[in-house]
Image (tube, rainbow, N blue to C red):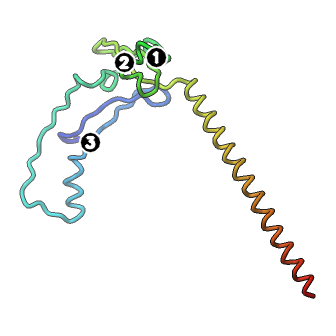
Amino acid sequence: MLGPYASSAFRQDRTGRRRKLTVLPNKCVLPFLAVAMGAQAEAPVREEKLSVSTSNLPCWLVEEFVVAEECAPCSNFQAKTTPECGSTGYVEKITCSSSKRSEFKSCRSALMEQRLFWKFEGAVIGLALVFACLVIVRQRQLDRKALEKVRKQIESI
């Protein structure tokens, strides 16, 4: 038993399988932290039962779903009217199994991931080149200083 504050949701992992997640709010942790830190409560704490309403949650969080339309870029109209388009600019249309509701779900497309990957690779290569140049410049400075020291020692003999 997870207690009165626990709620569960479903999430899709990388392989496409649905995983059940258990979510515990911070109110559950506070009494345990107080005891662990040695604090004593002056008045008894009354537990409130939280009712988890699934009506305001998207159906894909609490039910199994089927992807009706694959991940695609949002149209101009969708970008203005659908809040799911805001985070990634891509949406997929899903149909929940038990409630038969059709909803849009934000998704990350392979094309977008590929672009982000190559941007990251370019940034890493650019930084590597900058630091390689800095190492070469610093090595030349140190070589000049060493040669100057050797020259002064030879002159002093």
Residue nearest the viewer, comparing 16 with 39: 39
Which structural element holds mark 1? Answer: loop
Mark 2, Cα crowd under 10 Å, few <14 / some 14-19 / many 20+, is some
Please name the residue shown 25% across and 42% down the image: 25
Amino acid at pointer 1: Cys
Instruction: Kindly identify the amino acid type of the residue bearing the numbered disc 2.
Output: Thr
Residue bearing mark 3: 24
The local crowd at label 1, few if under 14, some if 14 to 19, many if 20 or more residues have their Cα within 10 Å, is: some
* Residue at figure coordinates x 8%, y 61% from the top left: 42
Image vertical order of residue 134 relative to residue 16, above or below: below
The structure residue drawn at horizontal position 75% and vertical position 62%, both measured from the top left corner, is: 138
Q: Quadrant of residue 103?
A: top left
Dot 1 or dot 3: first in sequence order is: 3
Name the residue beneath numbered marker 2: 82
Where is residue 18? Give x, y as percent. Answer: 40, 27
Of circles 2 and 3, the one toward us is 2
Q: Position of residue 10 (x, y in %)?
A: 34, 29
